Structure formats: C-alpha cells, structure tokens
Image (spheres, rainbow, N blue to C red):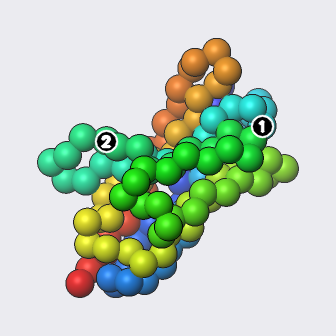
Amino acid sequence: QVQLVESGGGLVQTGGSRRLSCAASGTIFSGYTMGWYRQAPGKLRELVATIRFDTTNYADIVKGRFTISRDNAKNTVYLQMNALKTEDTAVYYCYLRTNYGTVYWGSGTLVTVSS
C-alpha cells in the first residue's frame, strides 16, 4: 500500500515562490509516475506536472514557472513554484501511478496566492 503525504502549502504573495514536497511510503519504483494535480474552488482537478524517470510533463499554464523534481532515494517528489499568480491558488494533490495503472492520491495541501 502506498501513502502520499504532501507538505509546503501556505500563503504566498503574487510573484513569490513556494516549494511543495510529497513523501511516498511503501514500495516505490523509479518507473512509477509521480506528480502534482491541483483543484481550485469550483473547478475540476487539473494536471500540473508529472515525472517518470527523467521525463517531465507540464501543463502549459505552469511551463517556465514550475519545476518538478524527484529524489528516488527519499521517495519524494517536489514542485518548485515560482512567479506565482492568484490563479495558482488551489489545493495541490500529490499523485502516483504504478506501472499496473493503480493510482494513489495524497490528501492535498492548500496554496493561496494573494495579490
């Protein structure tokens, strides 16, 4: 069983930076896809970024501002968020997908960007 625990959310001003972390427990292989989704109030959950081995994928709206990285030794994935905008305000969810297609979610961490 995999458990995902996010941290790093909080209040940040427009233009500021924040780093989210997600620690995974259980049997984790580097071939598993890990990443981040987010859900703003009244909106559907949307992809932010994913990483599998050294391959990364970003939503167009965060490209150039967010960077996803992974420390396989710590079973941890990070999301460095720079140049934050008010529209980045959301609950950010950690995501893991095994090679068998099983998906796990964290409970989420709230990021609020104030103007």
Location of mark 2 (residue): 45
The type of residue carrying mark 2 is Arg
Secondary structure under tag 2 reads: loop
Task: Work out which residue is located at the far left of the displayed protein and give it.
Answer: 42
Which numbered dot is residue 30? Answer: 1
* Percent position of residue 94, x then y: 51, 46
The quadrant in which the C terminus is found is: bottom left
* Percent position of residue 6, x then y: 54, 54
Answer yes or no: is residue 2 visible.
yes
* 82 in relation to 75, above or below: below
The type of residue carrying mark 1 is Ser
* Percent position of residue 25, x then y: 70, 39
* 8 in relation to 12, above or below: above
* 66 in relation to 108, above or below: below
Q: Judge left or right: residue 106 versus residue 113.
A: right
Q: What number of labels is visible?
A: 2
Of the pair 34 and 3, the residue shown nearer to us: 34
Q: Distance between the residues labelled 1 and 2?
A: 25 Å
* Percent position of residue 42, x then y: 15, 48
Q: Residue at x 69, y 32 (%)?
A: 32
